[in-house]
Amino acid sequence: MGILFWYIVRHYLGILILCLTGLVTIYLVIDFFEKLRRFLRHDAELTSMLLYFMFKIPDMVFQLVPFAVLMASLLAIGLLNKNREITAMRSCGVSLFHVTIPFLAVAGLVTALLLGLTAVVIPLANTKAEYIRTVEIQKKAQPLAFTSENLWLSLQGNALMHVQRVDPAGTHLYSVTLYRLKDQFTLDTLLTADNAAFISDQWTLRNVAQRKIKPNGSIEMVHRTSLPLELSLTPDDLMTWNALEPEHMTLNQLNAHIEHLRQEKTSVTRFLLDYWRRVAFAFVPLIMTILGVSIGLLEIGTRTVSIGKGIGQALGISFLFWATNSVGLTLGKSGALPPSIAAWIACTMFLIVSFNIFLKVRY
């Protein structure tokens, strides 16, 4: 790796960091003002709001990196071409193929970083952001652990609640156990109910067995047909948690969950599609780099480089990729395509187009 390699790497990285920083800043500002009014209705503290957006940054970066990489590739090649640096390189015997190697090296590094983000960092950050939004901002019950078949909640007044299963619509909770603790964290009351239903904006326990632990250690048991349950969560909250579950899992956890569902003969389409979507999207920057560099090299010989043109090309290509990817994911969700094919179809199509343009460049 010579001086020329590192010169192009520094040139490309500088533009890439500038593009990515600008895009993330714009995204943050728009998202902040969109959610500000909603958060202020809950009298949210500024610190909690800032922490929420801080933990959302990894996910924003993951979504915006392909667009930033494409834009930076177009602008970097355009500036090298405008300053006749590519012409100088060719006159010294450097082929255009060698000019593209630094771009591909950076793209490979970005792909590796994105795989790390989506495998571990983003799920953990999304979980923390969801906790801040639900518990600290909206003042709702704390989700200690949640899947559609196992829900633990920390309630006010030293109480813990366990739910065996949550209805898909979020309106019914089955096999509810409520533990009320004393200040010394000893058991005070144990409630068990067959289910809880959300009726008229209020949760109601049905067929309740209440066990009261007396100071002498004896147990007083009372049966009730129904009993109000003080729970701030709504069915929409439970549906949201369930819908976001794959995004809060690392890739290893998601893979283990898929295997568990397969053993139980349960549909794994949604989880398998999310798994391959996240893996496939990490490789998009590499594809966009090949495409951006190829388009830029086709314009060698002109000294006119327009930032607006580069941004316009990046926007148009990104929109086409987003539309193609959305169609593929929709076909995967509907079962028309296997999840692995649905997640990779956009990447495959754009990779073919990228190589086609790449081969048209005169090296």
Image (spheres, rainbow, N blue to C red):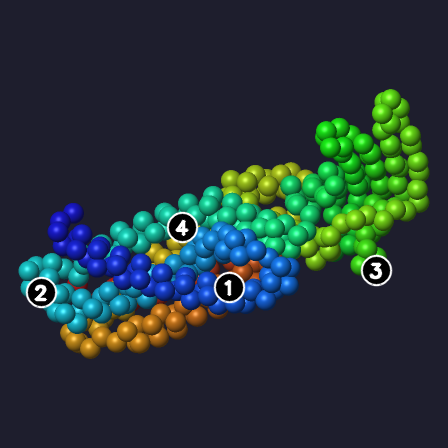
Residue 92 is situated, as x and y percent measured from the top left of the image, at 6, 60
Question: Mark 4 or mark 3, which is nearer the start of the sequence?
Answer: 4
Question: Looking at the image, do the residues carrying marks 3 and 2 touch, with CB atoms under 8 Å apart?
Answer: no
Q: Which residue is mark 2?
A: 88
Tell me the quadrant of the picture where the C terminus can be found: bottom left
Mark 4 or mark 1, which is nearer to you? Answer: 1
Mark 3 or mark 2, which is nearer to you? Answer: 3
Mark 3 or mark 4, which is nearer to you? Answer: 3
Q: Which residue is mark 4?
A: 114
Residue 28 is situated, as x and y percent measured from the top left of the image, at 46, 62
Q: Which residue is mark 3?
A: 200
Question: Mark 1 or mark 2, which is nearer the start of the sequence?
Answer: 1
Amino acid carrying mark 3 in the image: Ser
Q: Nearer the viewer, residue 131 or 8?
A: 131
Q: Which residue is mark 1?
A: 32
Q: CA distance from mark 3 to mark 4?
A: 45 Å
Q: Is residue 144 left or right of residue 360?
A: right
Q: CA distance from mark 2 to mark 1?
A: 46 Å
Q: Secondary structure at mark 1?
A: helix
